[in-house]
Amino acid sequence: MLRSSRELSSRVDINVHRQPNRQRRAAWWLALWSGVGSLMWLMLQHSQGENQIYQAGDVTTPHRLIENECWRCHTTWTPLQRLVAFSDDAHSIDNKKCETCHRVAEHHANQIPAHKDISCAACHQEHEGTDMLTRPSSRHCIACHTELKTTHGVSEVFAKRVIRFDEREGHPEFRLKTLLKDAASEPPNAKHGVNLAIENFKRPGDAASRWQDRGRIRFNHAAHLKAEYDANGKLIHGLIGKDRKLTDLSRSCEVCHEPDQEGRFLKPISFERHCRECHPLLFDHERFPGQAVPHQTPDIVRGFLTETYTLREFGSRKSEVGLPSDEPSRPLPGHRDFQRLSKDQAKAVLDDVTKAEQIAQQHRHSQFGYEATGGCRYCHEVEPVADKSPTAIADWKIVPTNIPSRWLLHSKFHHEPHRLLSCTVCHADVAQSKNTGDVLIPSIDICRACHAHRPAEWLDGIKADSVPKSESPQAPPNESLKDLLSNVNRGARTLCIECHVYHDRSKNKWDGPFVR
């Protein structure tokens, strides 16, 4: 039997709202006494002269000079504004205050939002620790790079979406590595920095054009890293240098690749320091034993040879008249001594210079022995001069080397923190590289091996012999990358600023006045 609405309504207590709720009342009294207690504590601290409770945390070390002058940075009071708007976009610091001392360049001229519309305090948050000001969180970068746009639409140079460093919606492979893997891939934008590192062309000896190192110089890493040892591990012969000891493949790189003073980059290879010992540019081993032409432009080389053979001709002429060839001639008082060669002597000098140039350019100098492996053509591409200018002396030229000074132009790198690893951990293919066009820059997977948190099963994809072993019997074997990472639980930092910067510091203006 169904009950009527009258019977159901009679069961409802119409005075329920007047009955006390112990839980609600306890919460109300707790909030009240918490507020009263906090207010009384603030009044007590103020009466005792303790004002630190109203102040923010310590400023960073560079700002200690003005830590007691809040007005130099702060212009408004915005905590209530942020609380009401439920947003962290409101800041009490005007960009003009920062620009009084810091005159920095913008990130990109076509960025969205524009550089002038971004608050400095949005990324550089003070009172958060000693290094927070220069190490902003990656979320500031991701805010734009989640859907990267420019004033001209989608960016043609950089990836449209990067929110992580690993593979899943993460950082893409380095552009030069993608071009090297797929020769048919779309060429990069002309503004991309990869164009200053690699190029699609056909090098002499190549079957077809390909993406490769744009340097126009011949070099074989595999040949220079070879070494011969006896049964006791003593070095018999090493192509890295006859007077230098080569004990370990991973350390032999330092013979040529020397770090700069900061340890960040490597110094350029120098012929005088690294090459001349094994590759002297000999030109006349019979009349000038051991003497080499300077490693300079063809005009300087021809001038050096002309002077060398001319002085030799003058010396032989003095010997004919009974004078020492090395004694300078003394001109008559009041007269200038113009020494001239006869036509036959001038022709002989020209023939000697031409022959010496040809010898110096030879690809190999087998007649000079092993120590003189080759001349100009051994490393450089030599071409004849088609349209010789009136000021030019030589009729041949060296193709510009175009050796890249930087490989990853859109990033920063520091070798010093990576010195705990051998060179071959990252540059694993260097010992097998025989082609000049090989690009030995590591892929992003090598970076992710340390700069990311990886599960244990990820190591299964790494080859156990990913690092070449040392050729020296005495040297301990190099630790492979898999062995090195087997005990790694947490990787190195993966902040965006580890490799990238926002401000173009090369355009900074260091003339901001600081007036007290």
Image: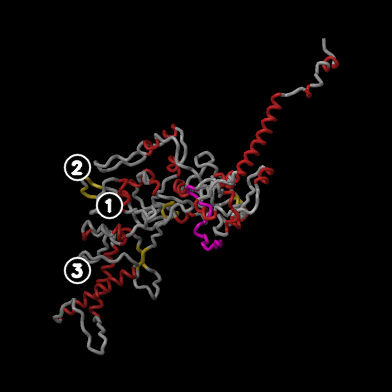
Locate residue 416, reporting x and y percent. 39, 49
Residue 1 relative to residue 299: left or right: right
* Boundaries of the magenta span: 496-516
Residue carrying label 1:
240
Viewer-side label of 3, 2:
2
Is disc 1 placed on a helix, strand or loop?
loop
Is disc 2 placed on a helix, strand or loop?
loop
Residue carrying label 3:
287
Write down the quadrant of residue 307 in the picture: bottom left
Amino acid type of the residue tagged 1 in the rendering: Ile
Report how many numbered discs are placed on residues in the image.
3
Please tell me how crowded label 2 is: few (under 14), some (14-19), or many (20+) other residues with Cα within 10 Å.
few
On residue 150, which mark appears?
none
Taking the magenta stretch, the answer to whether it contains residue 514 is: yes
Q: Is residue 381 above or below residue 36?
A: below
Residue carrying label 2:
232
Locate residue 28, reporting x and y percent. 70, 30
Residue 486 relative to residue 22: left or right: left
